[in-house]
Amino acid sequence: MAEIKDRYVNALIELSEENDTLEKDLEQAILIRNALNDDDVKAFLVHPHVPDSAKHRLFQNNFSTKITQEFMGFLYLMVRKNRESLIIPVLEEYIVRINKRSGRIEAKIVSAKALTNDQIESIRIVLTRQTGMQIMVHTAVDPDVISGFYILMDGRIFDGTLRSELNMMKEHLKRGNLG
């Protein structure tokens, strides 16, 4: 499946390069990803009894005035090839690759309670220094996080939560290593 996903990502990038519309296409990919990245929408798209025409209507109603014909064609192609489950992964990889080319990385900070703008900016500055890239921060609140926060960035997790600290302490105690 990864090979198929990469083929679609490469084709979208090639199309954007040919049309010299990388930044515009990046914005459209983010718009589509965000709109379709809902459990109910994903279930609708992959449901075998939902006709292709209903899926096309969903795209038409939500995107017809907001995205290019190339992206609309991509969505229709994914439906025609029964690859609806790959739409979000393809768009996510496309976004990551275009951002990396432009020296940007998306980072998601998940915390127990909402962070202040100053806290978010401090984290962004540290991440920018560590990566040498511009960091685009998204935040989320997860009440299951006991304390602290974790960061999802570039396929990695940086965990600074109390739960991870307690788990590390537990492992050290199991091994008899208290120092």
Image (spheres, helix red, strand yellow):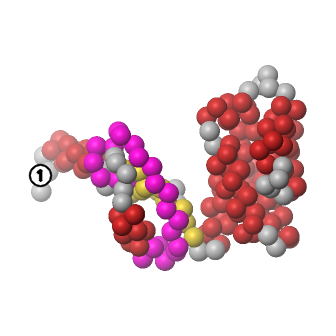
Q: Is residue 120 left or right of residue 31?
A: left
Visible in this render: residue 179? yes
Q: Position of residue 172 (x, y in %)?
A: 18, 48
Count of numbered tags: 1
| Near-viewer residue (96 or 25) | 25
- Residue 81 seen from this side: no
Residue 163 versus residue 124 in the image, above or below:
above
Residue appearing at x 81%, y 35% in the figure:
55
Residue sitting at x 62%, y 39%: 38
Circle 1 sits on which residue? 178
Residue 132 place in picture, x, y as percent: 49, 77
The structure residue drawn at horizontal position 87% and vertical position 50%, both measured from the top left corner, is 73
Query: In the rendered image, which quarter contains the C terminus?
Result: bottom left
* Residue 169: % across, % down: 19, 47
- Range shown magenta: 128-150
Q: Is residue 123 above or below residue 148?
A: below
Say whether residue 134 is magenta. Answer: yes
